[in-house]
Image: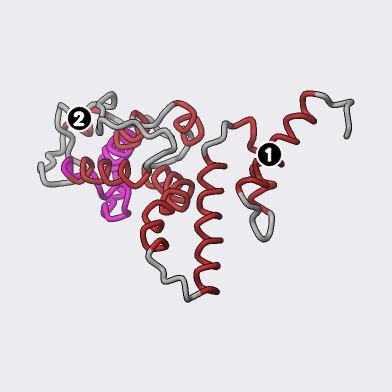
Amino acid sequence: MEVPNTSLIQNITIDSLNPLYLHLSNHPGMILVSKYFDGNGFGAWKRATTIALSAKNKIGFINNTVNMPTNQPYLALLKRCNDIVKSWILNTLNHDIRDSVLYAETAQILWNELNSRYSQANSARDELNAINSIPSCACGAAHAFAKREEDQRLIQFLVGLNPSYDMIRSNILMMQPLPSIDNAYGILIQEENTERNPHHHH
């Protein structure tokens, strides 16, 4: 990666309406939204972050709409804006989550990773209300919904576990159909006991 030539950057005038425009207040250490994302309430965090990026005219860096000029010195500016947007997003993540996405190449990739990881589990809450209003006569449908609701809760529960459970978490997520939370919890406890007493088998 070549080092951006700053003298080049100073020679181009960028209109303040251009997404590549960086106001002096837009430094990497800025806190974009007041709410830290710790794995819970992804929907709310995502909305706040989207609004903030939109207000700063940087939403294009996370929704693929910035038309990227590929020539210098724009390339250097592009990289700078991208790094700034990336650091703004990283600043609002708790350190476990931040460490797990630190090496995402661009703000867009970082954003996509967070979305694929958390939006699935967090959409559960929005669906709960819809699920609760299903008439009880639709037994089959109600049962299917209840199972889906439980699966969502299980995913949420697993997502909340600390990284030392990564291995067992992926094993549980591979199961078809997914186990109930109680069963999953049982598996985790069993795993913990085996870890603690490796020589002791029931």
In the figure, residue 140 lies in which quadrant? bottom right
Residue 81 part of the magenta-drawn span: yes
Residue 4 at what x, y percent from top left?
Answer: 32, 32
Find residue 167 and name its label. Answer: 1
Residues in magenta, as a range: 55-83
Residue 194 at what x, y percent from top left?
Answer: 80, 30
Which residue is at the front of the view, 159 or 76? 159
The answer to whether marks 1 and 2 mark residues whose Cβ atoms lie closer than 8 Å is no
State the quadrant of the N terminus: top left
In this picture, is 134 found above or below 179? Answer: below
Within 10 angstroms of label 2, few (less than 14), some, or many (20 or more) residues? some
In this picture, is 176 found above or below 21? Answer: below
Within 10 angstroms of label 1, few (less than 14), some, or many (20 or more) residues? few
**Residue on which the image places disc 2:** 26
Q: Amino acid at mark 2?
A: Asn
Residue 198 at what x, y percent from top left?
Answer: 84, 26
Q: Nearer the viewer, mark 1 or mark 2?
A: 1
Residue drawn at point x = 39 percent, y = 31 percent: 93
In this picture, is 181 found above or below 93? Answer: below
Q: How far, Cα to Cα, is label 1 from label 2?
A: 40 Å
Residue drawn at point x = 25 percent, y = 26 percent: 30
Find residue 54 and name its label. Answer: none
Q: Amino acid at mark 1?
A: Met
Which residue is at the front of the view, 69 or 39? 39
Question: Under tag 2, what secondary structure?
Answer: loop
In the figure, residue 144 lies in which quadrant? bottom right
